[in-house]
Amino acid sequence: MRILIAEDDPVLADGLMRSLRQADYAVDCVAAGDQAEHVLLAQTYDLVILDLGLPRLDGFEVLRRLRHRGSKVPVLVLTARDAVDDRVRGLDLGADDYLTKPFDLPELEARVRALIRRGQSGGGSTLSHGALKLDTAGRRATLKGVSLDLSARELGVLEVLMHRSGRVVNKEQLAEQLYGWDEEVGANAIEVYVHRLRKKLEPAGVTIRTIRGLGYLLDKPEHE
């Protein structure tokens, strides 16, 4: 799960980023509206946390342009403004939820989970690959009805591979979904996650193949 935070208060932005990364989200952060606009044109996110009072391009305009492009990414608006008119305008422009500063981090995290679930339910939140099932909203995988003990990173790798079943996925594509821009990615980190995941899946006949020089391939199930 990848989240963009657009917030110009560095202390708040850092706190949000740390909290969400501890919850195993990949998080990117920008401090100005024009930066948010640029990033949203180039990158796909599962959720946007958007401050209305951004410099150079305010959050209202960022949101308006995002929805004008047809993007359905869930948007949680954060603002110090508590006027009813601002809340109404934000919702009318396409915000999915609204949180007024100051707020408690547990409440924000609960709203983040709810918005991501809501965003995924529109396209179906369960991925299937033969006997392997992944509930992307509940972050739970089962194999032949039995729950798999997977770390958050392993779940992230599995989600990408299942979305692209039968196609090669390279390390860069996996890292993009698992890490924020400024997070250090160890040289062998992706290999380690794939190796651990492979060991848990192969006994049940689910195969992740390494395509030398290209990446990884989740073989299509025999009966599909």
Image (cartoon, rainbow, N blue to C red):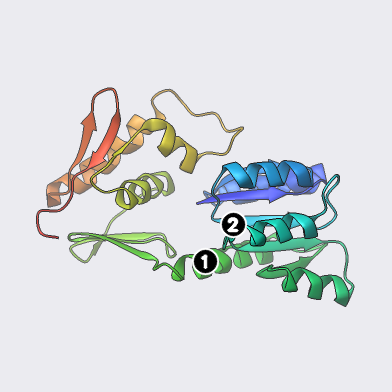
Question: Which residue in the protein does label 1 denote?
Answer: 119
Callout 2 amino acid: Leu
Pick whichever, 220 or 187, lies toward us: 220
193 lies above or below 188? below
Judge left or right: residue 5 versus residue 127. right
Q: In screen coordinates, is 195 left or right of 44?
A: left
Q: Position of residue 153 (x, y in %)?
A: 42, 44
Q: Nearer the viewer, residue 193 or 84?
A: 84
Tell me the amino acid under the disc marked 1: Gly
* Numbered disc 2: secondary structure: strand
Q: Give percent across and percent down for residue 32.
A: 79, 43
Identify the residue shown where x is 65% and y is 62%. Answer: 67
**Mark carried by residue 100:** none
Q: Position of residue 210 (x, y in %)?
A: 23, 31
Q: Which residue is mark 2?
A: 47
Question: Which is more toward the observer, 6 or 114?
Answer: 6
In the rendered image, the quadrant that contains the C terminus is: bottom left
Residue at 73% x, 49% y: name it: 6
**Horizontally, is 224 left or right of 190 in the view?**
left
Q: Residues within 10 Å of mark 1 (few under 14, many from 20)?
A: many
On the image, the x and y values in percent for residue 5 come to: 68, 49
> Residue placed at 57% from the left, 48% from the top?
22
Residue 193 in the image: above or below residue 127: above
Mark 2–mark 1 Cα distance, whole angstroms, equals: 8 Å
**Residue drawn at x 54%, y 55% as measured from the top left:** 46
Quarter assignment of residue 50: bottom right
Q: Residues within 10 Å of mark 2 (few under 14, many from 20)?
A: many
